[in-house]
Image: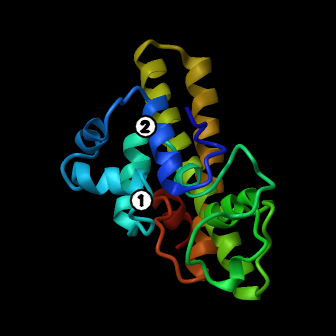
Amino acid sequence: MTDFGTATTIGGRIQALRRARGMRTSKELADAIGGTMTVSIIENIELGRKSNLDVAQLLSIAMALQVPPSYVLAPMNRPDAPLDLPGLSPAFDGMTAIEFDSWLASLEDGAHSPTTLDGRTMRFELAALREWSVATAEIRRLTVMEELERAEGAGEYTRAASQRIEEARREADRLAAMLNAGGWTLPISEEREGKSA
């Protein structure tokens, strides 16, 4: 059986991933996708008779296989291997699997560096957006924790949770303000808006 990380085609990686996920047949993958792709389309992709996937097909397959799209698109177990995707523009010439993953994920410190100011700005903004998302998730988690501690009468823990919530709000608001200045539309906490008004 081919290892999905070293297979040299999209179809080979999909077939190996499907088998690694315990799906013996293309029908099982089609069922996991939920009816948007037929068994014959999946079989044609796996056997190399259909080498071009549209974005919806790629994302549906990756989600059903529970892998990031990079695992379908590139030989990730050979990070220094060149991309093996057919039909790419010359801009991808010489790009390795790890550089491709870095570019696709827009990693700030990844193996691929944008060559234009706009590209660098976009990568920076996406990194800030990810940090903002983490901070807002932390606020939600800490708020639940604070409510539980308050209900149990754990005063010292409640104060600590309140302080951590305020720190997370400040960070989320700082990131939101920075991104909003760049044209994004992110909420800033009402308490902080009231203080600055």
Q: How many angstroms separate mark 2 from mark 1 (CA)?
A: 14 Å
Q: Is residue 156 above or below residue 96?
A: above
User: Mark 1: few, some, or many residues within 10 Å (few <14, many ≥20)?
Assistant: some
Colouring chosen for the image of the structure: rainbow
Number of numbered discs overlaid on the protein picture: 2
Residue at 64% in and 63% down: 84
**Which of the pair 61/185 is nearer the observer?**
61
Which amino acid, mark 2? Answer: Arg
Asked if 97 appears above or below 78 in the picture, the reply is below
Residue 95: % across, % down: 76, 69
Q: Is residue 113 visible?
A: yes
Frontmost residue, 5 versus 68: 5
Quadrant holding the N terminus: top right
User: Mark 2 = which residue?
Assistant: 18
Measured from the top left, where is residue 139 in percent x and y?
Answer: 52, 42
Neighbor class of circle 2 (other Cα within 10 Å; few <14, some 14-19, many 20+) is: many
- Above or below residue 154? Residue 195 is below
Which residue: 48% across, 68% down? 186
Q: Position of residue 6 (x, y in %)?
A: 66, 44
Label 2 or label 1, whichever lies nearer to me, is: 2
Q: Is residue 54 left or right of residue 110?
A: left
Point out the residue furthest to the left here: 35
Camera-side residue: 69 or 125?
A: 69
- Tag 2 secondary structure: helix
**Image vertical order of residue 156 relative to residue 83, above or below:** above
Q: Quadrant of residue 130?
A: bottom right
Q: Which residue is mark 1?
A: 58
- The structure residue drawn at horizontal position 66% and vertical position 46%, both measured from the top left corner, is 167
Q: In terms of sequence position, does the residue under pointer 2 or pointer 1 come before the other?
A: 2
Q: Amino acid at mark 1?
A: Leu
Looking at the rendered structure, the secondary structure element under dot 1 is helix
